[in-house]
Amino acid sequence: QKEVEQNSGPLSVPEGAIASLNCTYSDRGSQSFFWYRQYSGKSPELIMFIYSNGDKEDGRFTAQLNKASQYVSLLIRDSQPSDSATYLCAVNARGNQGGKLIFGQGTELSVKP
Amino acid sequence: GAVVSQHPSRVICKSGTSVKIECRSLDFQATTMFWYRQFPKKSLMLMATSNEGSKATYEQGVEKDKFLINHASLTLSTLTVTSAHPEDSSFYICSAPSSGAATDTQYFGPGTRLTVL
């Protein structure tokens, strides 16, 4: 089992819809969870981080964390074509290891006009 | 968010030469930085953890003599690809936690695209 798993997609949604991106992780001791967006040919950029169970909202983005189910998700409301990118889920490594993160393989999102 | 820079953004070199890539934290100090490589359509692969004042920690399967890492100061880490070959062509990206604490957020540099002819 991979430490961090994401559906590679592509996930295709129409413009204006809600895009739901999911991620599961294997280490029950993980404490920090991150979502990054990566456009083709560019480096990842941070969208959100979440540490506590529940929802965290920032503009059109909502991160959801359920530690009991070892599940973290990212919702994008009112999806725009400019949201088309690969979304990477990351979890802090076992024992933290100086801030090391474990990344999922990423989910490719395509928002159709 | 915190700013991390990389230089150069793109480099083309001949097989057998060495290439140095710099990673700088511009508005914060980083005792730890991370180096990744990414092939097209693939996810990030962590190569090593760069530690200020001590040796880098390499991931399994990464040749430490080929990918030399030096963390010269609290704002600068360098990755040198020695005797580069075409299979080393990739997108190299560094990142740094914003304040060095274990759970702090990592910020990525813009990446360096290396092409070895």
Image: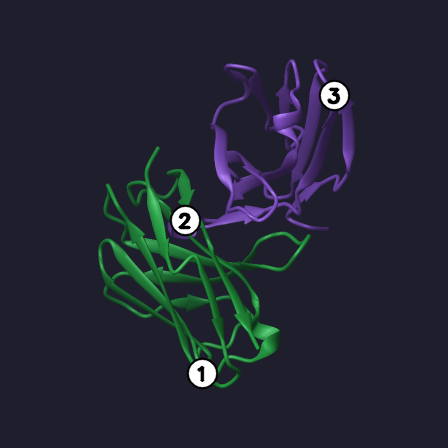
Chain colours: A purple, B green
Residue at image x 27%, y 58%?
A: B76
Q: Depth check: give the residue in front, B72 or A4.
A: B72
From what the image shows, is residue B78 above or below residue B93?
below
The amino acid type found where label 3 is placed reads Pro
- Where does residue B72 sit, x and y in percent of width and height? 23, 65
Q: Secondary structure at mark 3?
A: loop
Type of residue at label 2?
Answer: Gly
Cα gap from disc 2 to disc 3, whole angstroms? 31 Å
Q: Which comes sooner in the sequence, label 1 or label 2?
A: 1
For disc 1, the marked residue is B17
Task: Kindly indicate the quadrant of the structure image that contains residue B57.
Answer: bottom left
Of helix, strand and loop, which one carries label 1? loop
Same-chain status of marks 2 and 3:
no
Q: Is A64 left or right of B72, judged from the image as shown?
A: right
Q: Are marks 1 and 2 in contact (CB under 8 Å)?
A: no
Q: CA distance from mark 1 to mark 3?
A: 46 Å
Residue A52, percent from left and from top = 49, 23
Left or right: A5 in relation to B59: right
Per the rendering, the mark at residue B109 is: 2
Q: Position of residue B70 (x, y in %)?
A: 31, 69
| Quarter of the figure that contains the C terminus of chain B | bottom right
Instruction: Check disc 2 and report its element: helix, strand or loop.
Output: loop
Query: Dot 1, how many residues are within 10 Å of its Cα: few (below 14), some (14-19), or many (20+)?
Result: few
The residue that label 3 is drawn on is: A113
